[in-house]
Image: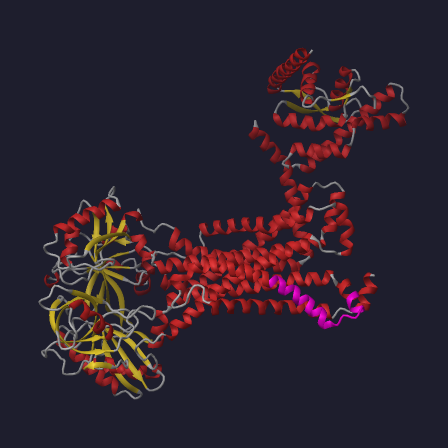
Amino acid sequence: MKLRSAGVRLLALFRRRKLDRELDDEILAHLELAERDAIAAGVIPEEARQAARRNFGGIEQMKEDHRDHRSVRLIENLARDFRYGMGSLARDPGFAAVTIGLLALGIGANSAMFSIVDAVLLKPLPFPEPERMVRVWEAPPGARNGTTTLTFLDWKRQGDIFEALSAECPTKAAVTTDSYPERVPGKLVSADYFQVFGVQPQIGRTFARGEDQPGAAPVVVLSHAFWQTQFAADPGVLKRDLVLDGKPHRIIGVLPAGCFDRDQAVFWKPLIFAPEQLNRGQHWLTPIGRLRAGVSLEQARAKMTMLRASLNAVIYQKDWGFAVDRFTQMLVGDTLRRSIYLAFGAVLLVLLIACANVANLALAKGATRRKEMALRTALGASRGRLIVQLLTESLVLCLLGGVAGVALGSMLLHAAAPLVAESLPFTADLSMDLRVLGFAAAAVMAVLILTGLLPSLQTSFGKLSNALNQAARGSSGSSAAVRRTIVIAEVAASVVLICGAALLFKSLAKLQQVDAGVRIDHVITMSADLPSAAYPTPDSAARFYEAVVQRIRAVPGVEQASVSQGLPLQGVQWGESMSLPGTRESVLVRLKLVDPWYFGAMQIPVETGRGIETRDRAGAPPIVVINQELARQVPKTFGIANLVGRAVDIWVPGYGPIPESLVNLQIVGVIRSERTAGLHAPSELVAYVPLAQFPRQDIKLEVRTRNGPAAAMPGIREAVRQIDPNLPLGDVMTMEQVKEQSMLWARQPTWVVGAFAGVAGLMAALGLYGVLAHAVTEQRREIGIRMALGARPGEIVSHTVRSALAMLLVGLAVGLAGAFALTRALKSLLFEVSALDPVALAFACVLMTLVGILAALIPASRAAGVDPMTVLRNEG
Amino acid sequence: MSEYKTDVPYGTLDLLILKTLDTMGPMHGYRIARRIEQVAENLLRLNQGSIYPALIRLEQQGWIRTQWGISETKRKVKLYSLTRAGLKQLTIEVANWERATALVARFLEAES
């Protein structure tokens, strides 16, 4: 019955006119009959008509009652209010434009930011049962490390823990495109790699069991994007080969479009272990696995701990355990997580400030509409009815603002995605999907409540007679107080943001001033990978290094050139244990492989002993140069006074399929520390071994130039081409760019918070301006009188500015209290700056005050320009 | 208005209308109002217009239905009549009313 009645009522909405007409007919018939009966009873016609009407009661009232009963009154009113709201917006387009603009900005920035939050932190990974995906490590105390081939194979045999376990190893291979060799990134993976992700190929198949065993035919799986660009999405691609480093590989499958396109790799080929790699010395694998269904993380960890105990006899690092971590967790680092929370918090504050501004505008508008509202109350509109009407007007604004906001947000996201993609995990799909739209809708509702409810309560409360009397005079009562409070809150929120931004900028500035330990300017760097086919032996690689440095140095404009594995600030790939022969002590050192010219080109001075020289070539006694940090710390561990001159054992990576080996090296010198792991990271313990003695295929070239480094690039390319025409150069970057990139983690949140703080400050200033401008308009009469009595324009200006300052100061005090409470959240993102740094906080306060005073000067000067004669004549 | 007239007891207009339609058969709004006034013998103060909102409510509940007829003044009017559900509702409302008056009566007796 309920449903039926609801249905009938809804239907009645659309039949309103017809039902009204029918009711009119019925009333007419009723009155006629009543009149006729009365006449029949002997009443004279005139009186009969009146009696009929009297007995009927109030016709209009009854009609209203009738409408209430027959249809959904709320909706009928809503539709009317909606039209009315549109109309009143059209009458005041300035107000509408500013309001919609503010809301669009707030909602747009929030939707874009939410999309990032959602993609990185909330959405489940785009793989089936992502909670079963894990990373498996060897774990030195308090750290995570890769594992060795044999240990990995031991893990892989644990079928009761892992459904699939795969190693993955980044690689690059030369692919010839348009007759120009290009190195494209790929991955070497175990055959069950795609089972770990639970990914089915779009066409073809992924690797079969056994395809990662020695002797298997070379096969390759392509990413969807690579298939489209390189093979023009040829459906017959499975019959074709991909030539990698000159060797044809049969294409067996293409992955679906999606997250694997955001990964760097464009091809995957089986990781086949060479016999020499089957050792427990070289920690080069970072396996990823899928737990067997029903195996919990805790169970897996417990089983791995038992396995570790059973392998104690064969694993060298006695204090290293095995660790299992959720893949999801490893995907998003702490810094990224904090940065995202921070940016989202900042953008929420911006939305709140935007809401405050809109509410303030609505209040100001409400004040001028008080008379209209009072009149409507007098005519019988209930208070609830008026509130609903005002809320409907707000709803119109919020919906328009929301639609504009979603459009703006999707533009922002489109613009920001390429900038932030590098910092986000490859699984993060940034798009304006339904979830983001849902969030935007929720934001609109929240905004509606925040901006609509307060002004409508404010407007429709209060005594009728007061409103009718006051409206003409324009005296500002409680409404002005509320508006002032809102502005103070805006200023406070902005101060919190500006304080945060000031701290982050100061931290960034500090970071920028850190001495990298190398000379950054006028250096250009590039990478190369020596293919095994052309450089099969360590000697062939060593010959290349020497020749390429000679040739590049001859290029006009080039001062110095060097070859190394890895660049300053980018981290050192190899972490190996170093020990004194005959002792049980060992320390974990970063191992860097450099040629004799590296220290010179990067201007790293030798402190004691000697650096690496040309005589340290293959066949000569192996040597090592250590950095100051290592020279300072390690004697303590080993219990000796001086390391220089001593011989130490270090695991040194091999060349190509040649495995890592334990080498006895003599320490010949100490160099000043360079920042190896980024400007913020303390100096690491670094050992430098000659690249000529321990060559690598993946190398970096550093070239110091006399003038602009970019100008020397063509000459450098030509020089390399003369030595090896088939060797492509990649990752061409100046050291300045390398430095910038190493600061990205600090730069991105800083600029995001900075931008939001700027917007927030401007909005607060706008709010302040609005309140003051309104006050000046309302007080024109008072100002006129005061000027007529002899007040000078300067005094009028200072009066307005003083009232601005009062609001600003209260806002600053509240904001600073907030900043004290909230900037602690920044701690992990700040570099050598306290979360309560007085200079930064003071700067934020001064900035806010200046912006606020500027905003106050406009209405103040207008107040000073009031002509007493005109005002008094007009309003007297 | 006369002193002794009373308003329609709260919530009973529906009952009065249903009972009227039950005894008199299909009739239009004016006749229903007149019939209620006549039965009440001028003890009741009824705004005749107030039965129309009540009629639309009862119609939406499905208790009465309308059909078009011609009035004595040759005008097209709606004739209201009881549905089966309305008949059932009438017995429920009568029972409710009797229960309520019995309750009140018992209180009044207990007081004296």
Give A766 or B19, whichever is nearer the viewer.
A766
Rendered location of residue B23, percent (x, y): 69, 14
Q: Is residue A119 left or right of residue B103?
A: left
Q: Name the residue: 69% across, 61% down.
A: A774
Q: Main SS type for the magenta part?
A: helix
Rendered location of residue B61, percent (x, y): 61, 26
Give A243 or A46, whichever is nearer the viewer.
A46
Res. A288 image quadrant: bottom left
Rendered location of residue A472, percent (x, y): 78, 54
Q: Is residue A200 above or below residue A36?
A: below
Res. A383 image quadrant: top right
Q: Is residue A797 magenta?
A: yes
Task: Let me know if residue A431 appears in the view.
Answer: no
Colour mode of the rendering: secondary structure
Give A37 or A440, whichever is nearer the viewer.
A440
Q: Name the residue: 8% across, 67% down.
A: A582
Q: Is residue B49 left or right of residue A522?
A: right
Task: Let me know if residue A232 appears in the view.
Answer: yes
Per the rendered image, the range of residues in magenta is: A785-808
Give A268 or A763, whichever is nearer the viewer.
A763
Q: Is residue B34 left or right of residue A196?
A: right
Q: Is residue A388 above or below residue A661?
A: above
Rendered location of residue A638, percent (x, y): 15, 68
Figure quadrant of the N terminus of chain A:
top right
Res. A74 image quadrant: top right
Q: Is residue A189 magenta?
A: no
Q: Name the residue: 29% across, 84% down.
A: A715
